[in-house]
Amino acid sequence: MGRTPCCDKAQVKRGPWSPEEDMVLKKYIEGHGTGGNWIALPQKAGLKRCGKSCRLRWLNYLRPDIKHGGFTDEEDDIICGLYNNIGSRWSVIASQLPGRTDNDIKNYWNTKLKKRRTMAMAAAQAPSSNNTTSIDTIVDRINDFPRPPPPSTSPVVIPIVKDETYTCDDFLKPVVPSPPVSATTDTGLGFGRYDSPPVVAGLAGPPRVQLNASDASSLVTVDDGSLYSDWWTNGSGDTDEFFLEFGGEVPMEFLTSSSDASFFDTETRSQVT
DNA sequence: AAGTTCTTCAACCGCTCCTCG
DNA sequence: GCGAGGAGCGGTTGAAGAACT
């Protein structure tokens, strides 16, 4: 038994809204308000639409003072900065941008800003001409990487945007301070997803980091000729995001192959296939 | 000019959260 | 305290138009 659907899909119209439907919905809400009940609204307004569809149409398109497109540089910076701080909390980000909807911002991020960030990451990581780089450089790059916030059970604090300066072009500078570095661990610096011990690729054992080559940033050859990489991964399955905290002296020591998704055992420091 | 690929964004889906009885 | 139902949210899809070959 699934849950009762909010409306009968066979009875409601779907797809793009016609100007007539827009007018009916707009006039009804302007005259009566939503009544705090979107499910009942379409019937009252005489629309053959699902209540959720009406809500979405109103909030994302018909609502007064909505701005579409034409994001300013300042808005770009705010979105980038907030994404850096709180991740894909589009509704929270939208609340900081008057006239913008979460859907608009989400689309804008996915089509424009995400690409820009990817390019910025690639540029920041481009190996030097002799194809080697120092460990210090790698540590700097890793520290400068934008990263999603660590999981937290504490309430989300909405940043006060006006008191902070964000620049998209300078997006690699983290707004969130990096976690404190332990002086005793020598396992590198990075972050990714933590897979609960019993369920990673059917293997039991210690925690493992899932590395997904498609999301991993480029490997870098360091002075001694060995390969290093910071990384950013989406992982898959039932995973919990976490920050791996590594020491500052040796940033990474893993992953000499960048082929398909692989797992890295943080305890044995070996790749698990 | 025609076909193909890419980009954009409105809309849908399914999930979680919240409220109320 | 519990369950039902509505609201809200984020991820994803797909149609339409633009750009490219």
Image (cartoon, coloured by chain):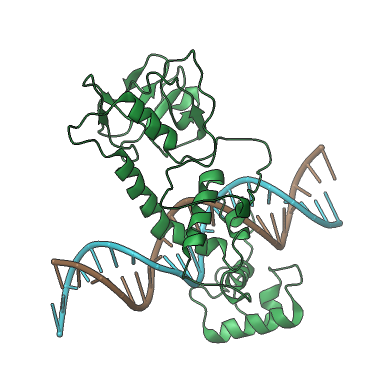
Chain colours: A green, B cyan, C brown
Q: Is residue A261 left or right of residue A84?
A: left
- Residue B19, quarter of the rendered image: bottom right
Q: Is residue C12 left or right of residue A59?
A: left
| Of A70 and C18, the residue lying toward us | A70
| Of A70 and C21, the residue lying toward us | A70
Q: Is residue A235 visible?
A: no
Q: Is residue A56 above or below residue A64?
A: above
Quadrant in which the C terminus of chain A is drawn: top left
- Residue C5, quarter of the rendered image: bottom right
| Of A51 and A105, the residue lying toward us | A105
Rendered residue at 43%/47% (across/down): A171
| Of C12 and A101, the residue lying toward us | A101
Image coordinates of residue A28 in percent, x first then y, are 69, 82
Q: Is residue A74 visible?
A: yes
Rendered residue at 46%/32% (across/down): A193
Image coordinates of residue A126 in percent, x first then y, are 26, 40
Image coordinates of residue A94 in percent, x first then y, are 59, 59
Image coordinates of residue A60 in percent, x first then y, are 57, 69
- Residue A224, quarter of the rendered image: top left
Rendered residue at 54%/75% (across/down): A13
How many labels, in total? 0
